[in-house]
Image: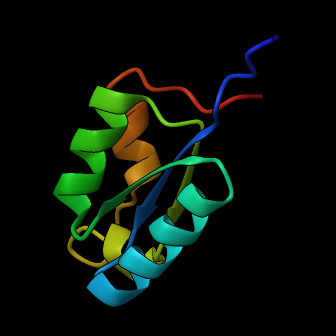
Amino acid sequence: MVRVPVARILVTDDDPELVDILVTHLCEEGYGGSGALTRDEGLKLVTLSRPDLVLLDVSVTRRNGTGSECSSASARSIRPPR
């Protein structure tokens, strides 16, 4: 039997119920799901677990109202796929 790699998906949102629901459904569908409730927690999980996809609430990613996680991730040599 050939083993297909499971896509790892990180859900980042400040609503714990939403994160729980999404991660639960992702896992039920066969994905590797994990959740983060804050920007810092999300960045830490991106660095440690290297998810294949990140679903995030844009309002969670704001830094002082201007920056975004994309620039923070790039600064840490985490490059999005092209």
Does 40 sit above or below residue 6? below
Q: Residue at x 47, y 76 (%)?
A: 58
Q: Does any portion of residue 5 appear in the rendered image?
A: yes
Viewed as shown, does residue 60 lie left or right of 29? left
At horizontal 44% and vertical 26% (from top left) the residue drawn is 78
**Residue in front for this viewpoint, 45 or 19:** 19
Residue 79 in percent (x, y) is at 54, 26
**Closer-to-camera residue (28/72):** 28
The furthest residue to the front: 1
The quadrant of the picture occupied by the C terminus is top right
What is the residue that sits farthest to the top in this orientation? 1
In percent of width and height, residue 6 lies at 64, 32
Residue 21 in the image: x percent, y percent?
46, 80
On screen, residue 36 versus residue 55, left or right, reads left
| Quadrant in which residue 20 is drawn | bottom left
Q: Is residue 2 above or below residue 30?
A: above
Q: In the displayed image of the protein, which residue is found farthest to the right?
A: 1
Does residue 15 show up?
no
Figure disc tally: 0
- Name which residue lies at 45% across and 62% down: 11
Viewport quadrant of the N terminus:
top right
Q: In the rendered view, does 73 fall on the left or right side of 24? A: left
Position of residue 81 measured from the top left corner of the image (x, y, whole percent)? 70, 29
- The coloring applied to the image is rainbow
Judge whether 30 appears above or below 19 on screen: above
Q: As displayed, is residue 23 above or below residue 34?
A: below
- In the figure, residue 61 lies in which quadrant? bottom left
